[in-house]
Amino acid sequence: MKISNIKATTVTVPLEAPLRHSNGAHWGRFVRTIVEVETDEGITGLGEMGGGGESAQAAFNGLKSYLIGHDPFQLEELRYKICNPTASLYNNRTQLHAAIEFACLDIMGKKLGVSVSQLLGGRVRDAVPFASYLFFRHPHEKSGLGEVRTVEQLVEHCRELKEKYGFTTHKLKGGVFHPDYELECYKALAETFPKDRLRYDPNAALSVEDSIRFGQAIEGLNNDYFEDPTWGLNGMRRVRSMVRIPTATNTVVVNFEQLAANILDPAIDVILLDTTFWGGIRPCIKAAGVCETFQYGIAVHSSGELGIQLATMLHLGAVVPNLAFAADAHYHHLVDDLIVGGKMGYENGAIRVPDGPGLGVELDREKLAEYAELYRELGGYPYDRDPARPDWFPLVPNDRWASPESTTTAGGGRA
Ligand code: MG
Protein backbone atom coordinates (compact mmCIF):
# COMPACT_ATOMS: atom_id res chain seq x y z
CA MET A 1 0.00 0.00 0.00
CA LYS A 2 1.19 3.50 -0.77
CA ILE A 3 0.23 7.00 0.32
CA SER A 4 -1.22 8.76 -2.72
CA ASN A 5 -2.26 12.17 -1.37
CA ILE A 6 -2.44 14.31 1.80
CA LYS A 7 -5.17 16.89 2.43
CA ALA A 8 -5.26 19.39 5.28
CA THR A 9 -8.34 21.45 6.15
CA THR A 10 -8.40 24.04 8.92
CA VAL A 11 -11.66 24.33 10.83
CA THR A 12 -13.14 26.40 13.64
CA VAL A 13 -15.58 24.84 16.10
CA PRO A 14 -17.37 27.03 18.68
CA LEU A 15 -17.08 26.60 22.45
CA GLU A 16 -19.86 27.05 25.02
CA ALA A 17 -18.01 30.11 26.38
CA PRO A 18 -14.43 31.44 26.08
CA LEU A 19 -11.96 29.47 28.25
CA ARG A 20 -9.47 31.60 30.19
CA HIS A 21 -5.81 30.64 30.60
CA SER A 22 -2.88 32.29 32.36
CA ASN A 23 -1.66 35.79 31.54
CA GLY A 24 -4.89 36.84 29.85
CA ALA A 25 -4.74 34.10 27.20
CA HIS A 26 -8.01 32.46 26.33
CA TRP A 27 -9.71 30.29 23.74
CA GLY A 28 -12.85 31.83 22.23
CA ARG A 29 -13.21 28.96 19.76
CA PHE A 30 -11.12 26.00 18.68
CA VAL A 31 -9.02 26.20 15.54
CA ARG A 32 -7.83 22.77 14.43
CA THR A 33 -6.46 21.27 11.22
CA ILE A 34 -7.96 18.00 9.96
CA VAL A 35 -5.61 15.81 7.95
CA GLU A 36 -6.67 13.14 5.47
CA VAL A 37 -4.04 10.71 4.18
CA GLU A 38 -5.22 8.89 1.05
CA THR A 39 -3.81 5.62 -0.27
CA ASP A 40 -3.69 3.82 -3.60
CA GLU A 41 -6.04 1.18 -2.16
CA GLY A 42 -8.81 3.69 -1.54
CA ILE A 43 -8.41 3.67 2.25
CA THR A 44 -8.16 7.12 3.85
CA GLY A 45 -6.74 7.74 7.31
CA LEU A 46 -7.60 10.67 9.58
CA GLY A 47 -5.34 12.93 11.63
CA GLU A 48 -5.74 16.20 13.53
CA MET A 49 -3.45 18.98 14.73
CA GLY A 50 -3.99 22.05 16.89
CA GLY A 51 -3.94 25.48 15.32
CA GLY A 52 -3.96 25.88 11.62
CA GLY A 53 -4.58 28.22 8.81
CA GLU A 54 -2.48 28.65 5.73
CA SER A 55 0.75 27.77 7.54
CA ALA A 56 -0.56 24.39 8.74
CA GLN A 57 -2.05 23.55 5.38
CA ALA A 58 1.21 24.55 3.66
CA ALA A 59 3.25 22.49 6.15
CA PHE A 60 1.25 19.35 5.38
CA ASN A 61 1.48 20.06 1.66
CA GLY A 62 5.23 20.35 2.13
CA LEU A 63 5.33 16.75 3.39
CA LYS A 64 3.91 15.38 0.15
CA SER A 65 7.30 15.15 -1.53
CA TYR A 66 8.52 12.95 1.37
CA LEU A 67 5.41 10.84 1.79
CA ILE A 68 3.68 10.16 -1.49
CA GLY A 69 4.62 6.58 -2.31
CA HIS A 70 5.41 5.78 1.35
CA ASP A 71 3.93 2.56 2.79
CA PRO A 72 1.73 3.67 5.75
CA PHE A 73 2.68 0.49 7.65
CA GLN A 74 6.32 1.67 7.75
CA LEU A 75 5.95 3.84 10.83
CA GLU A 76 9.60 3.98 11.97
CA GLU A 77 10.70 4.97 8.47
CA LEU A 78 7.94 7.56 8.54
CA ARG A 79 9.37 9.02 11.75
CA TYR A 80 12.82 9.32 10.20
CA LYS A 81 11.44 10.85 7.03
CA ILE A 82 9.49 13.54 8.90
CA CYS A 83 11.65 14.20 11.97
CA ASN A 84 15.01 12.54 11.60
CA PRO A 85 16.60 12.83 15.07
CA THR A 86 20.09 13.16 13.57
CA ALA A 87 18.97 16.26 11.66
CA SER A 88 16.85 17.78 14.39
CA LEU A 89 18.45 21.21 14.00
CA TYR A 90 16.82 21.44 10.61
CA ASN A 91 13.30 20.40 11.38
CA ASN A 92 10.66 20.88 13.98
CA ARG A 93 7.96 18.65 12.70
CA THR A 94 6.97 16.62 15.75
CA GLN A 95 3.37 17.81 15.70
CA LEU A 96 3.04 17.29 11.95
CA HIS A 97 4.42 13.79 12.43
CA ALA A 98 1.79 13.14 15.08
CA ALA A 99 -1.09 13.95 12.72
CA ILE A 100 0.38 11.76 9.96
CA GLU A 101 1.05 8.92 12.43
CA PHE A 102 -2.60 9.04 13.57
CA ALA A 103 -3.70 8.78 9.95
CA CYS A 104 -1.32 5.89 9.15
CA LEU A 105 -2.50 3.96 12.23
CA ASP A 106 -6.07 4.62 11.10
CA ILE A 107 -5.22 3.25 7.64
CA MET A 108 -3.53 0.15 9.13
CA GLY A 109 -6.50 -0.57 11.37
CA LYS A 110 -8.97 -0.13 8.52
CA LYS A 111 -6.91 -2.39 6.25
CA LEU A 112 -6.64 -5.12 8.91
CA GLY A 113 -10.14 -4.67 10.34
CA VAL A 114 -8.92 -3.95 13.88
CA SER A 115 -8.92 -0.90 16.12
CA VAL A 116 -5.79 1.15 16.78
CA SER A 117 -5.74 -0.02 20.40
CA GLN A 118 -5.78 -3.65 19.21
CA LEU A 119 -2.83 -2.82 16.93
CA LEU A 120 -0.87 -1.17 19.74
CA GLY A 121 -0.82 -3.91 22.33
CA GLY A 122 -4.49 -4.54 23.06
CA ARG A 123 -6.83 -2.86 25.49
CA VAL A 124 -6.48 -3.11 29.22
CA ARG A 125 -9.61 -0.94 29.62
CA ASP A 126 -12.61 -0.30 27.37
CA ALA A 127 -13.39 3.21 28.62
CA VAL A 128 -11.10 6.04 29.72
CA PRO A 129 -12.09 8.17 32.75
CA PHE A 130 -11.84 11.95 32.39
CA ALA A 131 -11.48 14.94 34.72
CA SER A 132 -14.00 17.77 34.58
CA TYR A 133 -11.43 20.37 33.44
CA LEU A 134 -12.84 23.53 35.00
CA PHE A 135 -11.96 26.87 33.44
CA PHE A 136 -12.66 30.40 34.47
CA ARG A 137 -14.73 31.57 31.51
CA HIS A 138 -15.64 34.87 29.92
CA PRO A 139 -19.34 35.16 29.17
CA HIS A 140 -20.30 34.07 25.67
CA GLU A 141 -19.97 37.16 23.49
CA LYS A 142 -23.48 36.86 22.05
CA SER A 143 -25.60 35.17 24.70
CA GLY A 144 -23.73 36.64 27.68
CA LEU A 145 -24.06 33.22 29.35
CA GLY A 146 -21.51 30.78 30.68
CA GLU A 147 -19.36 33.09 32.78
CA VAL A 148 -17.22 31.44 35.48
CA ARG A 149 -15.51 34.07 37.62
CA THR A 150 -16.79 34.01 41.20
CA VAL A 151 -16.27 31.18 43.69
CA GLU A 152 -20.02 30.47 43.56
CA GLN A 153 -20.04 30.32 39.74
CA LEU A 154 -17.10 27.93 39.77
CA VAL A 155 -18.64 25.56 42.31
CA GLU A 156 -21.96 25.64 40.46
CA HIS A 157 -20.22 24.98 37.12
CA CYS A 158 -18.43 22.01 38.68
CA ARG A 159 -21.69 20.67 40.10
CA GLU A 160 -23.39 20.94 36.68
CA LEU A 161 -20.55 19.10 34.93
CA LYS A 162 -20.48 16.42 37.61
CA GLU A 163 -24.23 15.85 37.31
CA LYS A 164 -24.22 15.92 33.52
CA TYR A 165 -21.13 13.80 32.83
CA GLY A 166 -20.37 11.95 36.07
CA PHE A 167 -16.90 13.39 36.72
CA THR A 168 -15.29 12.54 40.06
CA THR A 169 -11.95 14.28 39.32
CA HIS A 170 -11.77 18.04 38.84
CA LYS A 171 -8.93 19.97 37.30
CA LEU A 172 -8.90 23.71 37.84
CA LYS A 173 -7.16 25.68 35.12
CA GLY A 174 -5.76 28.68 36.95
CA GLY A 175 -3.18 31.38 36.50
CA VAL A 176 -5.96 33.84 35.69
CA PHE A 177 -6.51 35.57 39.05
CA HIS A 178 -4.22 36.22 42.01
CA PRO A 179 -3.07 32.91 43.55
CA ASP A 180 -4.75 33.79 46.87
CA TYR A 181 -8.12 34.04 45.09
CA GLU A 182 -7.54 30.82 43.16
CA LEU A 183 -6.59 29.13 46.44
CA GLU A 184 -9.97 30.17 47.82
CA CYS A 185 -11.64 28.71 44.70
CA TYR A 186 -9.71 25.44 44.97
CA LYS A 187 -10.53 25.05 48.67
CA ALA A 188 -14.23 25.70 47.92
CA LEU A 189 -14.18 22.85 45.39
CA ALA A 190 -12.51 20.55 47.92
CA GLU A 191 -15.06 21.47 50.58
CA THR A 192 -18.07 21.05 48.28
CA PHE A 193 -16.93 17.75 46.73
CA PRO A 194 -14.95 16.11 49.56
CA LYS A 195 -14.89 12.63 48.00
CA ASP A 196 -13.66 13.82 44.59
CA ARG A 197 -10.07 14.22 43.44
CA LEU A 198 -8.57 17.58 42.49
CA ARG A 199 -5.70 18.99 40.48
CA TYR A 200 -4.53 22.55 39.84
CA ASP A 201 -2.77 23.83 36.73
CA PRO A 202 -1.97 27.56 36.38
CA ASN A 203 0.06 27.05 33.17
CA ALA A 204 3.35 27.92 34.92
CA ALA A 205 2.18 31.45 35.77
CA LEU A 206 3.28 31.42 39.43
CA SER A 207 6.70 32.27 40.81
CA VAL A 208 8.51 29.45 42.62
CA GLU A 209 7.71 31.11 45.95
CA ASP A 210 4.00 31.54 45.19
CA SER A 211 3.91 27.93 43.96
CA ILE A 212 5.38 26.73 47.26
CA ARG A 213 2.94 28.83 49.25
CA PHE A 214 -0.04 27.57 47.22
CA GLY A 215 1.18 23.98 47.27
CA GLN A 216 1.77 23.89 51.02
CA ALA A 217 -1.71 25.40 51.60
CA ILE A 218 -3.41 22.51 49.74
CA GLU A 219 -1.22 19.63 50.93
CA GLY A 220 -4.00 18.17 53.09
CA LEU A 221 -6.56 18.08 50.25
CA ASN A 222 -7.45 15.23 47.92
CA ASN A 223 -4.89 16.19 45.26
CA ASP A 224 -3.93 14.10 42.26
CA TYR A 225 -0.94 16.29 41.48
CA PHE A 226 0.34 19.87 41.22
CA GLU A 227 0.59 20.64 37.50
CA ASP A 228 3.10 23.16 36.16
CA PRO A 229 2.66 25.74 38.93
CA THR A 230 5.87 27.41 37.75
CA TRP A 231 8.03 27.20 34.64
CA GLY A 232 11.14 25.17 33.91
CA LEU A 233 12.62 21.97 35.29
CA ASN A 234 14.66 23.89 37.86
CA GLY A 235 11.68 25.85 39.12
CA MET A 236 9.60 22.69 39.35
CA ARG A 237 12.45 20.91 41.17
CA ARG A 238 12.54 23.67 43.80
CA VAL A 239 8.76 23.46 44.25
CA ARG A 240 8.93 19.67 44.53
CA SER A 241 11.54 19.93 47.27
CA MET A 242 9.18 22.03 49.41
CA VAL A 243 5.68 20.68 48.64
CA ARG A 244 4.40 17.21 49.50
CA ILE A 245 2.22 16.76 46.41
CA PRO A 246 3.37 14.92 43.27
CA THR A 247 4.32 17.38 40.52
CA ALA A 248 3.09 16.99 36.96
CA THR A 249 3.88 18.61 33.62
CA ASN A 250 2.84 18.92 30.03
CA THR A 251 5.41 21.64 29.36
CA VAL A 252 8.90 20.66 30.51
CA VAL A 253 8.92 16.91 29.85
CA VAL A 254 7.50 16.51 26.35
CA ASN A 255 10.23 14.49 24.67
CA PHE A 256 12.65 11.67 25.45
CA GLU A 257 15.67 13.86 26.15
CA GLN A 258 13.70 15.78 28.77
CA LEU A 259 12.33 12.53 30.17
CA ALA A 260 15.88 11.22 30.59
CA ALA A 261 16.99 14.47 32.24
CA ASN A 262 14.03 14.29 34.62
CA ILE A 263 14.84 10.71 35.62
CA LEU A 264 18.48 11.60 36.28
CA ASP A 265 17.56 14.66 38.37
CA PRO A 266 13.85 14.47 39.23
CA ALA A 267 11.61 17.51 39.06
CA ILE A 268 8.38 15.91 37.85
CA ASP A 269 6.51 12.90 39.26
CA VAL A 270 3.68 12.53 36.74
CA ILE A 271 4.27 12.90 33.01
CA LEU A 272 1.22 14.11 31.09
CA LEU A 273 1.35 12.40 27.72
CA ASP A 274 -0.03 14.40 24.81
CA THR A 275 -0.43 12.49 21.56
CA THR A 276 0.41 15.64 19.59
CA PHE A 277 3.25 17.12 21.68
CA TRP A 278 5.07 13.77 21.85
CA GLY A 279 4.68 13.18 18.12
CA GLY A 280 2.04 10.46 18.02
CA ILE A 281 0.36 7.68 19.96
CA ARG A 282 3.34 5.35 19.70
CA PRO A 283 5.89 7.77 21.27
CA CYS A 284 3.44 8.20 24.16
CA ILE A 285 3.30 4.43 24.64
CA LYS A 286 7.11 4.27 24.57
CA ALA A 287 7.28 7.07 27.16
CA ALA A 288 4.68 5.26 29.28
CA GLY A 289 6.99 2.23 29.22
CA VAL A 290 9.94 4.29 30.43
CA CYS A 291 7.75 5.73 33.20
CA GLU A 292 6.60 2.23 34.15
CA THR A 293 10.23 1.10 34.41
CA PHE A 294 11.24 4.03 36.65
CA GLN A 295 7.87 4.11 38.45
CA TYR A 296 6.86 7.59 37.40
CA GLY A 297 3.17 8.37 36.99
CA ILE A 298 1.46 9.09 33.70
CA ALA A 299 -1.80 10.66 32.59
CA VAL A 300 -3.34 11.54 29.22
CA HIS A 301 -3.03 15.25 28.42
CA SER A 302 -5.35 17.43 26.38
CA SER A 303 -4.11 20.30 24.25
CA GLY A 304 -7.60 20.80 22.84
CA GLU A 305 -9.25 18.29 20.58
CA LEU A 306 -12.04 17.42 18.23
CA GLY A 307 -13.20 13.83 17.82
CA ILE A 308 -10.23 12.55 15.82
CA GLN A 309 -7.68 13.71 18.38
CA LEU A 310 -9.97 12.49 21.17
CA ALA A 311 -9.94 9.04 19.54
CA THR A 312 -6.10 9.04 19.68
CA MET A 313 -6.30 9.89 23.41
CA LEU A 314 -8.82 7.09 23.99
CA HIS A 315 -6.73 4.47 22.19
CA LEU A 316 -3.66 5.60 24.15
CA GLY A 317 -5.59 5.46 27.42
CA ALA A 318 -6.88 2.01 26.52
CA VAL A 319 -3.46 0.37 26.13
CA VAL A 320 -1.21 1.81 28.87
CA PRO A 321 -1.48 -0.34 32.00
CA ASN A 322 0.11 2.26 34.29
CA LEU A 323 -2.56 4.92 33.76
CA ALA A 324 -3.52 5.77 37.35
CA PHE A 325 -5.22 9.15 36.83
CA ALA A 326 -8.26 10.44 34.96
CA ALA A 327 -7.42 11.91 31.56
CA ASP A 328 -7.90 15.56 30.61
CA ALA A 329 -10.10 16.74 27.74
CA HIS A 330 -11.45 20.10 26.66
CA TYR A 331 -14.05 18.12 24.71
CA HIS A 332 -17.10 18.81 26.89
CA HIS A 333 -16.63 22.57 26.34
CA LEU A 334 -17.27 22.19 22.58
CA VAL A 335 -20.72 22.76 21.16
CA ASP A 336 -20.24 20.30 18.30
CA ASP A 337 -17.88 17.86 16.61
CA LEU A 338 -17.25 16.92 13.01
CA ILE A 339 -17.33 13.16 13.33
CA VAL A 340 -20.27 11.07 12.12
CA GLY A 341 -22.81 10.72 14.92
CA GLY A 342 -21.82 13.99 16.61
CA LYS A 343 -19.99 14.36 19.91
CA MET A 344 -18.96 11.20 21.76
CA GLY A 345 -20.86 10.67 24.99
CA TYR A 346 -19.68 10.33 28.59
CA GLU A 347 -20.84 7.60 30.95
CA ASN A 348 -19.92 7.90 34.64
CA GLY A 349 -17.21 10.40 33.73
CA ALA A 350 -15.65 8.11 31.13
CA ILE A 351 -15.75 7.78 27.32
CA ARG A 352 -15.81 4.38 25.65
CA VAL A 353 -12.89 3.59 23.36
CA PRO A 354 -14.24 3.45 19.77
CA ASP A 355 -14.67 -0.13 18.54
CA GLY A 356 -14.58 0.39 14.78
CA PRO A 357 -11.49 -0.33 12.66
CA GLY A 358 -8.62 2.14 12.90
CA LEU A 359 -9.35 5.14 15.09
CA GLY A 360 -13.02 4.20 14.89
CA VAL A 361 -14.29 7.65 13.88
CA GLU A 362 -15.40 8.98 10.49
CA LEU A 363 -15.56 12.52 9.17
CA ASP A 364 -18.95 14.10 8.73
CA ARG A 365 -18.32 15.83 5.38
CA GLU A 366 -21.08 18.39 5.84
CA LYS A 367 -19.73 19.40 9.23
CA LEU A 368 -16.17 19.56 7.86
CA ALA A 369 -17.36 21.96 5.13
CA GLU A 370 -19.43 24.00 7.61
CA TYR A 371 -16.58 24.48 10.09
CA ALA A 372 -13.98 25.06 7.36
CA GLU A 373 -16.25 27.87 6.16
CA LEU A 374 -16.49 29.22 9.71
CA TYR A 375 -12.67 29.28 9.87
CA ARG A 376 -12.50 31.18 6.57
CA GLU A 377 -15.06 33.63 7.92
CA LEU A 378 -13.49 34.23 11.36
CA GLY A 379 -9.78 33.54 10.75
CA GLY A 380 -7.26 32.59 13.42
CA TYR A 381 -7.79 33.18 17.12
CA PRO A 382 -5.45 35.51 19.05
CA TYR A 383 -5.00 33.11 21.97
CA ASP A 384 -2.35 35.15 23.76
CA ARG A 385 -4.21 38.46 23.66
CA ASP A 386 -5.65 39.72 26.93
CA PRO A 387 -8.86 41.60 26.06
CA ALA A 388 -8.60 43.73 29.19
CA ARG A 389 -4.96 44.65 28.50
CA PRO A 390 -4.50 44.61 24.72
CA ASP A 391 -1.07 46.26 24.72
CA TRP A 392 0.34 44.21 27.55
CA PHE A 393 2.70 41.32 26.96
CA PRO A 394 2.66 38.44 29.46
CA LEU A 395 5.50 38.43 31.95
CA VAL A 396 6.75 35.25 33.56
CA PRO A 397 6.00 34.82 36.37
CA ASN A 398 2.80 36.80 36.28
CA ASP A 399 2.85 39.99 38.34
CA ARG A 400 -0.45 41.47 37.20
CA TRP A 401 -3.47 39.29 37.73
CA ALA A 402 -6.94 39.79 36.29
CA SER A 403 -9.53 41.07 38.74
CA PRO A 404 -12.29 38.71 39.86
CA GLU A 405 -14.41 41.72 40.80
CA SER A 406 -15.86 42.52 37.39
CA THR A 407 -16.95 40.74 34.25
CA THR A 408 -14.56 40.91 31.31
CA THR A 409 -15.73 39.74 27.93
CA ALA A 410 -13.45 38.10 25.39
CA GLY A 411 -14.50 40.85 23.00
CA GLY A 412 -12.68 43.40 25.14
CA GLY A 413 -15.44 45.24 26.98
CA ARG A 414 -16.19 45.30 30.66
CA ALA A 415 -19.71 44.78 31.91
MG1 MG B 1 -1.11 21.75 31.82
Image (cartoon, rainbow, N blue to C red):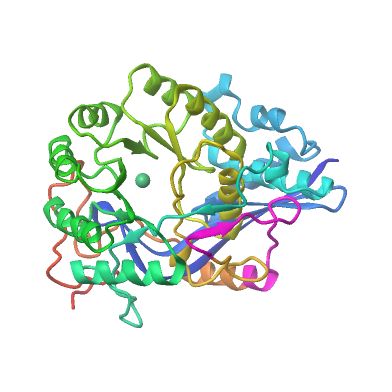
Picture quarter with the C terminus: bottom left
Q: Residue shown at 55%/36% (left/top)?
A: 284
Name the outermost residue toward the right. Answer: 41
57 relative position to 6: left or right? left
Vertical position of residue 369 compared to residue 270: above or below: below
Q: What x and y, as percent, mark residue 141?
A: 33, 77
List the single residue furthest toward the front: 195
Horizontal and vertical percent position of residue 367? 63, 72
Is 157 placed above or below 207 here?
A: below
The main secondary structure of the magenta stretch is loop
Q: Is residue 210 visible?
A: yes
Q: Quadrant of residue 77?
A: top right
Q: Is residue 280 visible?
A: no
Q: In the rendered structure, which segment of residues is drawn in magenta?
A: 346-369
Asked whether residue 353 is drawn in magenta, I would say yes
Q: Residue at x 82, y 49 (%)?
A: 113
Instruction: Tell whether 109 sits left or right of 170.
Output: right
Give residue 19's position: percent from left, percent from top: 34, 63
| Quadrant location, the N terminus | top right
Give yes or no for residue 265 being in the magenta stretch.
no
Q: Nearer the viewer, residue 376 or 350?
A: 350
